[in-house]
Amino acid sequence: MSLDVARIKKDFPLLARTVRDGKELIYLDSGATSQKPYQVLDAERAFYETSNAAVHRGAHALAEEATIHYEDARSTIAGFIGAAPSNIVFTKNATEALNLCSYAFSNATSLSRQGTVSRSIDPRFILKPGDSIVISEMEHHANLVPWQELCAKTGATLRWFSVDDEGRLDLSDMDTLIDATTKVVSIVHQSNILGTVNPVRAIMDRAHEVGAVGIVDGCQSVPHMPVDVASVGADLLMWSGHKMLGPTGIGCLYGTSEILDAMPPFLTGGSMIEMVSMETSTFAPAPQKFEAGTPMVAQAVGLAAGVRYLEEIGMDEVADHEAALTAHSLSVLTAIPGVRIIGPSTTVERGSSISFVVDGLHPHDVGQVLDNRGVAVRVGHHCAWPICRRFGVPATTRISPYIYNDESDIDSAAAGVVAAQDFFGVRP
Amino acid sequence: MNLESLYQEIILDHYKRPRGQGLLASPLGSAHHVNPTCGDELTVEVGLGSDGGLLIGYEGQGCSISQASASVMSELVSGHTVQDAETFRLAFIEMMHAKGTGEPDEEVLGDAVAFAGVAKFPARIKCALLGWMALQDAEIQSGLLTTQTKEHSP
Ligand SMILES: Cc1ncc(COP(=O)(O)O)c(C=O)c1O
């Protein structure tokens, strides 16, 4: 049942390279971005070599083929999360998808203030002072800053779930935090810094009780565990292709048909219209309504190949593999005196991203010693600065393994932490 | 490329025993800089001593490179004129941009030449420059430095 990591590794050409004067590369930064297998690289290359053309425009053979490839990719990716193709919008990345969502609200609000458009604006997207937006203290900046901006533009108030010492959301005040004033609830499925897996279903259900739009940031869940949009229960869910074997430059936004129809567009221009005159335009139905301009076709094709790669392994197997790595990581890291985990201390409702701090050492220096041994980890605040403040640390060191890592990689990271303690003379 | 080339003894020593740390009683100017990629923070203050030389105060948290660099900087610059401080600062920046090639001028930079190896680690250059950038802003804020020759770190 465990993954054949040695075989999987052979599919990832980059993992064969060395770093820092010939050291074997141990890549433990997949939470930031994953490496890409030949299957993805080949799919992109094959598309450019044989079928490249602008999609949804023109009627020549290549344009048709390219469109088929693009829409096939959409179907594959939609199927991966149990959605229909028309419920998947391609964006540049998850950050853009989150902005697409927040701009739906600010666009609706300013259009309604102007009163200059004839089309109807869904009142759910119109915000005013007194309305609230609910997020959590553990959000990535991508699911925080757009909402701050939206509040500044509309007068709505930002509220958030706090996080306890174990790195879990404090849901005790859920019914007062999410109340009749709440218009949006946007929560991360799995925290990129703490590793916590949040009970998003319960939170989405509460959001719907009060008529709010429910959003889930799936950046760290979709690549690592089976995610079925029906069971998550969100109106909108997004993630980035590059964290799940796909190329950079493509993100995905899932939306229910009902919500995508109701949302005003984000970017406007070619390809997203139905009819255009000099005075005004009407828009194509979703997903085209949200895909202005020439889309990222090769990237979609590449991501679909990544999805097929993961499906061949099986997402249950991926999740089991990562659960085993999580258990191993927690045990070897906590066995080092002076190391403190920032996040849940058990594997329960927890993913494989593991942040820690080392007494007497700054994460930058820990990361440097690891890097010198060929071990690539992330150091810093992981675009989640507020949660670092919450735990009273300026930054953390984070390991985030994936399907091509095994226990020996974790052991190398742990050995590097001890070496860093020795180098700086802070071993307790 | 080994760790010792980055973490010279002088750097580790300043990190463990920072010199001149603390804020000034009556600063003329101060600047708070952060490294947004890693969250390192540093406040640098400037004042003038009775002899007309610069007084430097600083306080912050961060990695060994950023904290040791601030310590070395305060030692190097304290008591000198603003013009001298500019000479040191520009020499330090040049060293950081030299990608580890070229000979830093020990006559000018003193202990700060220990940071020459940092130039080979692009991710750490910003750490080493944090204090120097804050110093310049503090000088501008105090009115001691008026020429807006603000160098941007890479
Ligand atoms: C939880 C979470 N949300 C959002 C993002 C933003 O993803 P991207 O930078 O690909 O837009 C990330 C990636 O760092 C993430 O981990």
Image: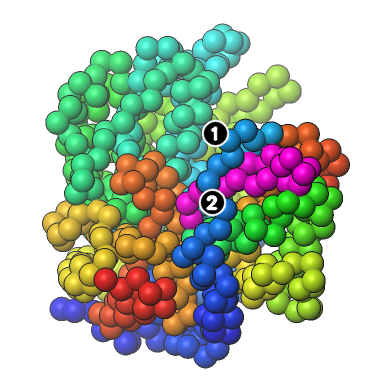
> For the point 62% across and 33% down, which residue is it?
B26
Q: In this rendering, would A326 be left or right of B28?
A: left
Counting from the top left corner in percent of width and height, residue A18 is at: 50, 86
Q: How is the image coloured?
A: rainbow
Q: Is mark 2 within 8 Å of ligand 1?
A: no
Q: Nearer the viewer, residue A98 or B13?
A: B13
Q: Dot 2: few (<14), some (14–19), or many (≥20) neighbours within 10 Å?
A: some
Counting from the top left corner in percent of width and height, residue A413 is at: 34, 76
Which residue range is magenta in the image?
B41-62
Q: Secondary structure at mark 2?
A: loop
Tag shown at residue A266: 1
Q: Is residue A110 above or below residue B137?
A: above
Residue annotated with mark 2: B21
Q: In this rendering, would A235 be left or right of B110?
A: left
What is the C-alpha distance between the residues marked 2 and 1?
Answer: 50 Å
> For the point 69% across and 72% down, which residue is it?
B113
Q: Is residue A296 visible?
A: no
Q: Nearer the viewer, residue B59 or B152?
A: B59
